[in-house]
Image (spheres, grey):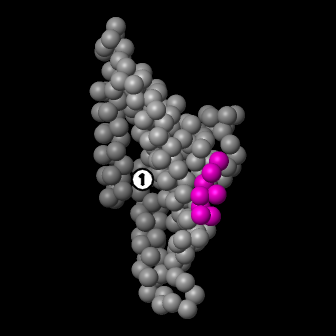
Amino acid sequence: MNVLDVVILAGLIAGTTVGLFQGILRQLIGLVLLYFALVLAAAYYQTVGTWIQRVVWANHQSVEALAFVLILLAAYGALSLVTRDYRQAHLSILKHVDQLGGVALGFVTTCVWISLFLAAVNFATEVPWTWHQPGKPVLATVRADSVRLAIHYSLQSSVLANVFARLLPYLILSVKPWAPTEILRILSVG
């Protein structure tokens, strides 16, 4: 068990606890918002990646992963703001059922978020990080690549990261009929 496993475990506990307090209805709305944010991220990450690459000298695959995560977070945040009134709703009739369902969906939603994040990080760390302009010193590149290798090694040696890597294809295949094919490429699912 490494530090990444502890962070993943803390995330699972936090997400499940949030589900307890939010309830099943709010968690369900959040899961639907995540799906739409995922579709938007899959549709536009290459375009945004091209824009980012005009500003930052970095590997194309790493920039695409960064663009994917940024769009996913921005779209989820924007959609959450639009639906914030609905996200205040609770099922007042059966409070315990609402909370228990919230715990279950909170756990599922957290698993999806963790799987997506780990897949994007894995996608970004598969190739060397080269952030230097031609003709400039290479010292920053060496430091960046050592960070990349440390992250990649941490992903490979993490027990929970490997569990989530095996879980991701099932999550994606469950929405495959409605998902753009680009989701499958960036998340490395065949």
- Name, please, the residue furthest toward the top: 93
Numbered label tally = 1
In terms of depth relative to the viewer, which is nearer, 59 or 71?
A: 71
Residue 127 visible from this viewpoint = no
Q: Quadrant of the N terminus?
A: bottom left
Q: Is residue 6 above or below residue 169?
A: below
The residue carrying mark 1 is 159
Q: Is residue 3 left or right of residue 129?
A: left
Q: Secondary structure at mark 1?
A: helix
Point out residue 138 in the picture as x, y percentages from the top left corner.
48, 88
Q: Please check the rendered image and state whether residue 83 is part of the magenta-colored stretch, yes or no.
A: no
In the image, what residue occupies the spot 46% across and 26% down?
28
In the image, what residue occupies the spot 33% across and 11% down?
92
Q: Please check the rendered image and state whether residue 47 is part of the magenta-colored stretch, yes or no.
A: yes
In the image, what residue occupies the spot 52% across and 82% down?
132
Point out residue 115 in the picture as x, y percentages from the top left corner.
49, 46
In terms of depth relative to the viewer, which is nearer, 2 or 53?
A: 53
Q: Is residue 163 above or below residue 56?
A: above
What segment is highlighted magenta in the picture? 43-51
In terms of depth relative to the viewer, which is nearer, 82 or 27?
A: 82
Quarter of the image for residue 103 reads top left
In the image, what residue occupies the spot 68% across and 42% down?
180
Residue 59 visible from this viewpoint = yes
Quarter of the image for residue 105 reads top left
Point out residue 157 in the picture as x, y percentages from the top left corner.
43, 61
Point out residue 187 in the picture as x, y percentages from the top left corner.
59, 51
Q: Is residue 174 above or below residue 114?
A: above
